[in-house]
Amino acid sequence: MAERSFVEEVKKLRLSGGDVFRGEGILAVTKALLESGVSYVAGYQGAPISHLMDVLADAQDILAEQGIRFENSASEATAAATLAASVNYPLRGAVTFKATVGTNVASDALANLASGGVTGGALIIVGEDYGEGSSIMQERSHAFAMKSQIWLLDPRPNLPSIVDAVKQGFDLSEASNTPVMLQLRIRACHVHGHFIAGDNKRAKFTLQEAMENPQRDVSRIVLPPASFVHEQEKVKDRWPAAVRFIEERKLNEFFSEDADDIGIIVQGGSYNTMLRALERLGLADVYGNTQVPLYVMNVAYPVIESEVLRFCEGKRAVMIVEEGQPNFVEQNLATILRQAGSTTALHGKDILPVAGEYTSSELLKGARAFCERYQRLAPLPVPVPVRKVIPLKEVAAIGVDAAPEPALAQPSTSLGEVVHARPPGFCTGCPERPIFSAMKLVERELGAHHVSADIGCHLFSILPPFNIGNTTMGYGLGGAGSSALNAPAGKRAISMMGDGGFWHNGLTSGVANSVFNKSDNLTIVVDNNYTSATGGQDILSSTAVNKTRSTGHEIERAVRGVGVEWVKTLRRTYDVAGMRDALKDALTTKTKGPKVLIAQSECMLNKQRREKPLVRKAIADGKRMVREKFGVDSDTCTGDHSCIRLSGCPSLSIKPNPDPLRTDPVATVLDSCVGCGVCGEVSHAAVLCPSFYKAQIVSNPSRWDLLRERLRSAVIGWLQRGEARRRETYAF
């Protein structure tokens, strides 16, 4: 169950030529693929591109009408290798995944694809997960494009430009026999707008024709000596063909080219932010009219030398806006200008930040500094000294020497300096939280263990209150990350991976590798029914019934299939005591060989997405519904707060102690509680105070519910009144 359904939105994909398409950037990309006559699409989900996979999954009937094959790939490498269909056949195909980690995983296939070249258009749509909203290490796809000579498109973040980039990307790929990358920044993926739709097109050459008439060209296969020729082809044939296409189609754009003797060169993805900065400086308007000449590189690689020299001719200085480090484009521009003998001054990282996301505030400061330097803006006024006005009688009282010194007005501080960091954490009711609560309890008995973490929600365990996890090497690489730590010792290393990472590559690189190398360590596979970290998509082991995919394949069977003998599956992770005992058994057993513990419970976020609408409808229909909620008895709570330290649930908090004789705040459960029961389970397993209770909230109660509640209230009221009378008897 994906985190968002596009069932209604995908109906727009049937719009015909001349209709106005309104929607989100990701949906526009799908429409552009349909209008480009693709034969197949594949990919692996991951922010910010997850929704493209979700749209494709919800639009499979429309894809089928156009004869398009759609694959939910097992990994980014699988997706990239799918493009092999375009090597020998004039088949247009597209794949998508998250960059740069996705590009890294797919690097082997992409390098071979770029070496041999393609016949049909091959488009790689990468979600450029860089900057503030990123969930990965800070790198860019640009380096890979340069390394393999894959042309890189970076369109302006508006729907017409994005749609045009998709269509032009296929044409560019075919014109130069080279795969093309289309990178979409986080905000571009989710930008809303409109464009004039075209007709959906069926592929001119079908998959069936390719299968019935197989073709092969030995010169396209990456095998020496052909592979030595491929490098020469890239430079002598494909690159010039790409440059000619980019120039003729005018993929890069010039705005107000001759308006001034200074200019700004900006990559397409940063255009909107750059224009906003100029608008704030009074040098542009919101419609794109600018007083400062702009050269917009919708093609980030290759850099078109003739266009750069044309833009810089007659200009005193230009500034390149290139987000991230290294400054590939800036170095390229410097070489072009130097070799041409140009006197135009080039600025970039000397004015703008060397690394990091170019937010609106950063570009505003950089644009101001550049324009001030070349007298296009008046310098900011020097801060005026602020003097405190002191009445004469106070001056006389404190003396002249004691009068305060004038102070300069202080600039406002950034949000990062005044707002506390909010590190990511587990959702309320997350089934992974009790796993780490149990690990903390085991740690009390057996001591700390080396824990090799993995990509996924379980990575949040490295933060308080659990503080578990030593390293993380990549998606599904938790087991491989602990492979070196397999030596005779008093403790076993622990590795983590989720069900998504397990099927991505953890089965081979982690579990099978540990079998082959006779590892004695423990691997914990967190099975929560979905690839929760990427948006809740179904996978092989999902229990959901999926009409277009095969699910229900148990992880335990796969693990035993590669030779693991010690395997245990816990069907309910919320059983903290059971999880604790299973962990102790795995870490202390005399049985040699790899140990695998599979911890199962459905992702609470997806469970709530599925069940809440059903509950709301049932309540609206007048049906009796019961919701469980936990609470803390303030009279019993000691104020120790061990329950919070061993759980960390967002719904578990503190409040002032109602007892005036006790000062320590007591624990409390907020209304966001989903009734998972972990707080009580932890309290019981850790032998903490028995202060937790479970309550039932009944909507649309029956007559029996109402009668039972009246009886309970009467009995409790009678007991309370009796207790009050006894206290009055002993009162002084």
Image (cartoon, grey):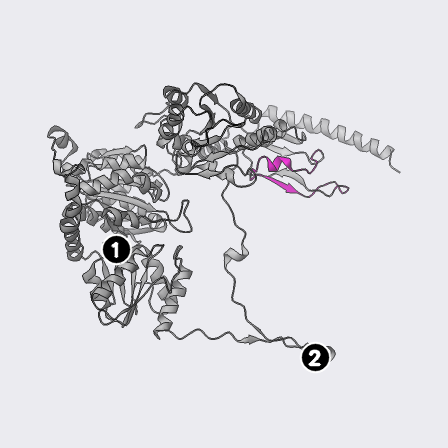
The image quadrant of residue 509 is top left
Res 478 quadrant in image: top left
Residue pushed farthest front? 488
Could you say which is closer to the camera, residue 142 or residue 635? 142
State how many labels appear.
2
What is the magenta range?
636-662
Q: Mark 2 Cα within 10 Å, few/some/many (few <14, many 20+)?
A: some
The spot of residue 120 in percent (x, y) is: 16, 41
Which quarter of the image is occupied by the N terminus? Answer: top left
- Which residue type carries mark 1? Asn
Disc 1/disc 2 C-alpha distance (Å): 65 Å
Q: At numbered mark 1, what does the secondary structure look like: helix, strand or loop?
A: loop
The residue beneath circle 2 is 395
Whether residue 677 appears in this view of the structure is no
Mark identifier at residue 298: 1
User: Which corner quadrant holds the C terminus?
Assistant: top right
Q: Main secondary structure of the magenta part?
A: loop
Tell me what residue is drawn at x 23 percent, y 72 percent.
314
Give whichever of 726, 77 is nearer the camera: 77
The residue sitting at 51% across, 67% down in the picture is 411
Does residue 205 appear left or right of residue 656 in this picture? Answer: left
Residue nearer the viewer, 362 or 303: 303
Image-quadrant location for residue 731: top right
Q: What's under tag 2, amino acid-wise?
A: Val
